[in-house]
Image: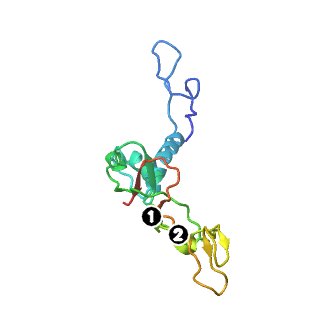
Amino acid sequence: MRRISAPYTAPGNRFQDAVPGTSQKATFFVANWFNDVQESLLFPIEASGRTPSADPNQLFCAMVDLIYPVGSYRLSEAEDSPAVVYTWQTWVEVAGRVLVGLDAAQTEFNVVGKQGGAKTHTLTVDEMPNHGHPTGGQTGLAGTGDDLSLPGQGTPQEVGAVGGGQPHNNLQPYRVVRMWRRTD
């Protein structure tokens, strides 16, 4: 869209009224300018898939549909769903999830809409770091303190089990927001 460019425009290419008894005349309009305005207004309406009508809200609805197409997410700390304002749209709240960008090279993130992950996780033996549990003591067949068996003789001494086997926290640093996904 462009500003009007016609005879008798006010400074800054603005409209002006005629003032009786002076030389100021009213801005008159040229068809090209009106056509440009019409096309500028119709473009987002038609781009959103709407048929132009007399509905006074159609331009607003079209602009919102273009900004938030189906599949869009909206994040906010406000309580209201976007559907309260955009009553012609359907939004579902996405709770307890974080968003991750699509990455075809990683099987966990290679499909849009895929869900995964866990809030906590209990390590398996294979997931624990490689480590040892050294013991002190004396070697020999007799003595005091911790006795260790010599190769081929007796039963090896074990170190007591440690750890509670409980799940550990996997949460990244976060800030909680309300999150909605447009479905219709």
Q: Amino acid at mark 1?
A: Gln
Depth check, front residue: 49 or 97: 97
Does label 1 or label 2 sit earlier along the sequence?
2
Residue bearing the label numbered 1:
166
Q: In the displayed image of the protein, which residue is found farthest to the top? A: 21
Q: In the displayed image of the protein, which residue is found farthest to the bottom? A: 152
Q: Amino acid at mark 2?
A: Gly
Residue 109 in which image quadrant: bottom right
Residue at 59% x, 26% y: name it.
12
Per the rendering, the mark at residue 160 is: 2
From this view, report whether residue 159 is shown above or below residue 67.
below
Q: Give the side of residue 138 with respect to residue 164, left or right.
A: right
Residue at 41% x, 46% y: name it.
59
Where does the image place residue 102, in percent across and percent down from the top left? 56, 65
Q: Secondary structure at mark 2?
A: loop
Where does the N terminus fall, quadrant-wise? top right
Where does the image place residue 58, in percent across and percent down from the top left? 37, 48
Q: Give the side of residue 140 with respect to residue 55, left or right.
A: right
From this view, report whether residue 59 is shown above or below residue 183.
above
Where does the image place residue 149, in percent across and percent down from the top left? 63, 79
Residue at 35% x, 54% y: name it.
89
Q: Residues within 10 Å of mark 1 (few under 14, many from 20)?
A: few
Q: Give the side of residue 82 with respect to residue 125, left or right.
A: left
Depth check, front residue: 57 or 92: 92
